């Protein structure tokens, strides 16, 4: 489902016609933006007005064609600092108005040039408002974008041959091949093992700011791999795909919980936490994607504006504790737009916190910093455990 495209000179990109065909046959026309070629994926829309560089390099967007709802994209260009991984992961990018001249002191090249250099097929001059409304009404669906095919029916036939996101196991496609370590900044206080299911680079950076040495392991890591690092806590990252297909990481997480290791999960890590606790997951109609999503922390009653990127959610009861083999689970955060579960907590019968997760992205790349306290909560959880002599080296 990744793009198959070739670079094209900047001055000819926007005059090359392109078509977008959804799996229900709805067709949109525009012009090529980025590489010339053809790509397939799941059509989703993102409501952020800024932060497109972080969005495009987020591994959670693997196999997805992202539609930007903000009408003007590319005006800050592309820099060499804000990537959240080593490459662009979106299968395609669809926008309305492309900035003609990027303007930012950190910009090194245009968005169009970077898309072309990485072979990412996109479109501009698209009625993204109409496209977004269609996806809101009909749901996220398979899509094809092409600047080499002019026949919508021919492109539709290829769209219908693509696998759906439901049932897709993608973590192994985006994870690191080899383990690596992000050192703590300043004095080392704690050690965390982070299982990379599609991790964003800002996440271990936020931990490093708090004196955490982070050992990043591949998605295929076993519990023995984790335990060998003698960690004070375990972290499961964000990532793409259907959580119901990620059987291996769920079993590893159950071993983590059974051994009473403090746990923190983000996004995909929240969904796998839900599965490990015995809850189901389901596919949302069109998902949550953007940096302007309101969420309530039910433990503090504080409302946070948060960064989201998920098409699946945990099916857990609101306002009702659930007994699990590892402790008592409750929903800790809820989305205020649609009451979707946005966080989980696991506690001992005496109320002691053992593990927690959120569905959104508190690392704030890109996005607001309302939820940065969650990293402090993780530090506190690990510190309390090590102070009682139960953890790894501090």
Image: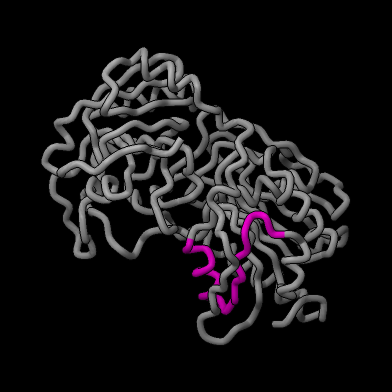
- Of residue 232 and residue 329, the one placed in the foreground of this image is 232
Out of 236 and 387, give the one closest to the viewer: 236
Residue at 63% from the left image edge and 63% from the top image edge: 217
Where does the image place residue 303, in percent across and percent down from the top left? Answer: 53, 50
Outermost residue, left side: 11
Residue 274: image x %, image y %?
72, 45
Give above or below for 313 relative to 26.
below
The quarter in which the C terminus is drawn is: bottom right
Which quarter of the figure has residue 241? Answer: top right
Membership of 90 in magenta stretch: no
- Which residue corresponds to the image point at 69% horizontal and 47% vertical from the top-left? 272
Question: What residue sits 32% from the left and 34% below the top?
Answer: 94
Task: Tell me where residue 351 sits by quadrant.
Answer: bottom right
**Residue 128: image location, x then y, percent:** 31, 29
Picture residue at 30% right of the left edge, 33% below the top: 37
Q: Is residue 302 visible?
A: no
Residue 365 placed where, x, y %? Answer: 43, 58
In the displayed structure image, the side of residue 21 where residue 232 appears, left or right: right
Magenta stretch contains residue 208: yes
Image position of 209 (left or right of 74): right
Quadrant for residue 156, please give it. Answer: top left
- The total number of labels drawn is 0
Coloration of the structure image: one colour
Identify the magenta region.
201-221
Q: Is residue 309 above or below residue 338?
A: below
């Amino acid at each position: 489902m990744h793009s198959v495209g070739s670079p094209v000179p900047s001055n000819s990109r926007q005059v090359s016609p392109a078509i977008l065909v959804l799996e229900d046959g709805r067709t949109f026309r525009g012009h090529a933006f980025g590489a010339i070629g053809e790509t397939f994926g799941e059509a989703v829309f993102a409501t952020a007005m800024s932060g497109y560089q972080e969005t495009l390099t987020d591994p959670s967007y693997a196999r997805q064609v992202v539609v930007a709802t903000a009408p003007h994209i590319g005006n800050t260009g592309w820099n060499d600092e804000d990537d959240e991984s080593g490459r662009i992961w979106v299968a395609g990018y669809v926008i309305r108005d492309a900035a003609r001249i990027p303007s930012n002191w950190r910009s090194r090249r245009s968005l169009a040039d970077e898309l072309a250099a990485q072979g990412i097929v996109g479109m501009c001059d698209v009625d993204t408002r109409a496209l977004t409304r269609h996806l809101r009404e009909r749901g996220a669906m398979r899509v094809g974008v092409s600047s080499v095919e002019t026949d919508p029916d021919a492109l539709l036939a290829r769209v219908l041959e693509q696998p759906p996101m439901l049932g897709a196991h993608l973590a192994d496609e985006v994870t690191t091949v080899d383990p690596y370590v992000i050192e703590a900044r300043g004095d080392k206080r704690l050690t965390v093992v982070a299982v990379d299911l599609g991790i964003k680079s800002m996440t271990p950076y936020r931990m490093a700011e708090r004196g955490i040495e982070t050992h990043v392991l591949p998605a295929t890591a076993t519990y023995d791999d984790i335990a060998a690092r003698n960690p004070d806590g375990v972290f499961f990252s964000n990532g793409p795909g259907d959580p119901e297909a990620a059987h291996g990481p769920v079993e590893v997480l159950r071993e983590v919980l059974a051994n009473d290791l403090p746990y923190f999960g983000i996004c995909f890590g929240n969904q796998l936490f839900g599965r490990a606790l015995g809850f189901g997951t389901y596919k949302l109609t069109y998902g949550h994607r953007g940096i302007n999503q309101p969420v309530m922390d039910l433990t503090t009653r504080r409302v946070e504006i948060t960064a989201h990127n998920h098409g699946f959610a945990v099916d857990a009861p609101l306002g009702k504790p659930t007994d699990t083999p590892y402790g008592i689970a409750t929903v800790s955060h809820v989305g205020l737009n649609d009451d979707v579960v946005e966080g989980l907590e696991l506690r001992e019968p005496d109320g002691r916190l053992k593990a927690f997760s959120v569905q959104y992205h508190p690392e704030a790349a890109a996005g607001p910093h309302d939820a940065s306290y969650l990293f402090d909560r993780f530090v506190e959880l690990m510190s309390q455990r090590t102070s009682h002599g139960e953890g790894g080296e501090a």
